[in-house]
């Protein structure tokens, strides 16, 4: 069974994200559901950081993100969003992208990021609820090549042959986010990519603790023990959390994530505050100041 054929409890999903209107097959519904989804469900990788593989069977995703009120990363976020939109009646296709953020020119990484193509009538839109602290907070038209504004930034899509490139405007300069094509991906494609992302020792989702969440006024992002806030307008602020207790409180109060309190979880979190780990995250943050991405 693929994620697209599993019926979730639509009313519980809409209640979880705080969507209270009657959904229709129009752009307003698509925008509003995406907005509510992103504001409610944090992007986070607590499961893989604490040493467990991420289960992306739809029943497991629904249990975690809806019933347990957790968040997740791209394979979870976009699979759940797709299931909800499909049950409403939208035509949704799962795609895959190559993340290009801060990679050398010409670099071709694996297609390890899940994204969605959603049609409203005959108009195609890129929808992505799982790209970390620069997650799209509005659908982008695929048939428009100029800049497109969203509540949390300006983006543009350009096409070259069968490939599309998504860029974001940061400090008046365009930066590549990811490239993709329109070939539908299967549950097996996502299973392989998810296995690497959630279990490989060199995966950023195994090495680092990551959480992001968009609010009407701006975005919060956590990278290990570094907490940043980027308002819609104004300067970005960054602080370093002092200890495990402060980290736990931050995860719960800002991101809505309750971390298990067993010994192994404590030891894993405590490792973020060791001198070697602190230096490592400082060096990592120095070249990743604008976003944590899937």
Image: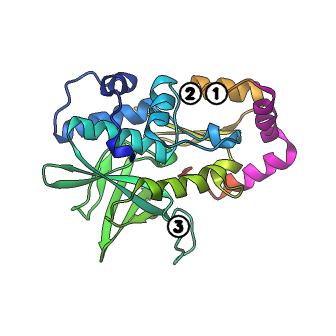
- Is disc 1 placed on a helix, strand or loop? helix
Extreme residue toward the left, this view: 121
Question: Is residue 243 something one can see in this rendering?
Answer: no
Q: Identify the residue at horizontal 39%, vertical 46% (top origin).
A: 1
Report, in whole angstroms, how far the alpha carbon at label 2 lies from the one at label 3. Answer: 32 Å
Q: Residue 254 bears which disc, if any?
A: 2
Which percent across, then down, holds residue 244?
Answer: 76, 29
How packed mark 1 is, by other alpha carbons closer than 10 Å (few <14, some 14-19, many 20 or more), is some
At 19% from the left edge and 42% from the top edge, which residue is drawn? Answer: 27
Determine whether label 2 and label 1 are within 8 Å by CB: yes
Foreground residue among 170 and 98: 98
Left or right, 18 with respect to 63, comes to: left
Residue 225, picture quadrant = top right
| 89 left or right, relative to 113 | left
Element under label 3? loop
Regarding residue 134, the answer to whether it shows in the image is yes
Q: Horizontal and vertical percent for residue 248?
A: 69, 26
Q: Which residues are magenta?
A: 262-283
Examine the rendered structure and indicate whether residue 247 appears above or below residue 226. Answer: above
How many angstroms separate mark 3 from mark 1 (CA)?
Answer: 33 Å
Kindly state the secondary structure of the residue where label 2 is placed.
loop
Residue 272 included in the magenta stretch of the image = yes
Closer-to-camera residue (36/23): 23
- Where is mark 3, residue-wise? 110
Q: Is residue 242 magenta?
A: no
Local crowd at mark 3 within 10 Å, few (<14), some, or many (≥20)?
A: few
Badge 2 crowding class, 10 Å Cα cut-off, few under 14, some 14 to 19, many 20 or more, is: some
Tell me: 187 left or right of 156: right
Name the spot of residue 193 as percent of width and height, x first.
53, 57
Residue beneath label 1, please? 250
């Amino acid at each position: 069974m693929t994620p697209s054929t599993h019926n979730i409890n639509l009313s519980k999903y809409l209640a979880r994200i705080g969507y209270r209107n009657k959904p229709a097959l129009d752009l307003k519904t698509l925008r509003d559901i995406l907005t509510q989804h992103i504001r409610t469900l944090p992007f986070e990788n607590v499961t893989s950081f604490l040493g467990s593989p991420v289960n992306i069977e739809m029943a497991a995703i629904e249990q975690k993100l809806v019933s347990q009120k957790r968040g997740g990363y791209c394979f979870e976020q976009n699979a759940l969003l797709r299931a909800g939109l499909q049950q409403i009646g939208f035509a949704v296709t799962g795609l895959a992208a190559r993340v290009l953020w801060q990679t050398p020119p010409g670099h071709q990484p694996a297609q390890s990021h899940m994204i969605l193509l959603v049609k409203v009538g005959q108009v195609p839109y890129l929808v992505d609820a799982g790209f970390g602290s620069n997650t799209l907070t509005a659908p982008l038209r695929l048939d428009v090549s100029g800049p497109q504004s969203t509540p949390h930034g300006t983006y543009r899509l350009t096409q070259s042959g069968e490939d599309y490139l998504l860029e974001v405007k940061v400090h008046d300069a365009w930066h590549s986010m990811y490239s993709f094509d329109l070939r539908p991906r299967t549950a097996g494609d996502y299973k392989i990519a998810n296995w690497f992302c959630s279990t490989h020792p060199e995966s950023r989702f195994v090495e680092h603790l990551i959480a992001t969440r968009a609010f009407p006024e701006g975005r919060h992002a956590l990278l290990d023990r570094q907490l940043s806030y980027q308002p819609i307008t104004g300067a970005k602020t960054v602080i370093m959390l002092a200890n495990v207790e402060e980290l736990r409180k931050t995860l719960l109060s800002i991101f809505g994530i309750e971390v298990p309190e067993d010994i192994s979880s404590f030891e894993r979190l405590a490792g973020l505050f060791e001198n070697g780990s602190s230096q490592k995250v400082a060096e990592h943050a120095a070249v990743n100041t604008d976003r944590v991405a899937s």
